[in-house]
Image (tube, rainbow, N blue to C red):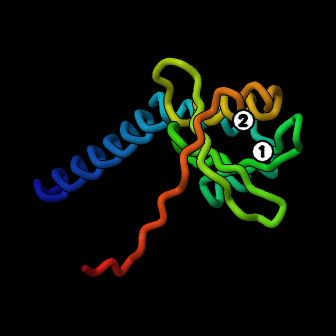
Amino acid sequence: MSLFRRCAAQISRLRALRQLYHAFVSESSPEAKGRTLLRQWLTPAQRTQFEEQGYFDVVGCATRRRYRVQYGSVANVREIDLEGRFGPFLCFAPEGYLVPGDVMLAQKIALETDEVATLAVANRVAAVVRRADRRS
């Protein structure tokens, strides 16, 4: 085997090993673990919605209102009215630093099990609408 072929084979093995390492690290990161736990708690419809669109809808236990939980940790929940219009962002999360998947799971559980108390502590943040062509 020529020196070139030996080097090419070693480079190929090194690339494969690097890809395997990156896949392992990315799957075992706190953020990946949070997303995995979240997916396990979602209903099949919510899981499909989350995987395809990056958010899922939750129905509150007391008022039966619908809320959209978007990927993130801050001001990532919005109420949806019967006509499908969005209300203000709701900002509520567990204490301490948690990855987005863990925060979203806590938000889902809070709305589904104690909606009234959750809404009592949530801050409401109006959506900012920006115009694309703002000229002075």
Q: Quadrant of the C terminus?
A: bottom left
- Amino acid type at image mark 1: Val
Q: Position of residue 22 (x, y in %)?
A: 37, 40
What residue is at 48 percent from the left and 34 percent from the top?
A: 31
Residue that numbered label 2 is attached to: 108
Which residue is farthest front? 136
All told, the count of numbered labels is: 2
User: Measured along the vertical axis of the image, is residue 76 above or below residue 81?
Assistant: above
> 73 and 35: which one is in front?
73
Which residue lies at the image location 35% right of the left edge and 47% below the top edge? 16
Front-most of 17 and 29?
29
Where residue 68 sits in the image (x, y, percent)? 69, 50
Along the horizontal axis of the image, is 46 left or right of 6?
right
At x 11%, y 54%, the residue is 3
* Element carrying mark 1: strand
Residue type marked 2: Lys
| SS for callout 2 | helix
* Residue 12, position as x, y percentages in the image: 28, 52
Q: Which residue is mark 1?
A: 58
Residue situated furthest left in the rendering: 3
Q: Image point 60% across, 54% down: which residue?
A: 54
Badge 2 vs badge 1, beta-carbon distance below 8 Å: yes
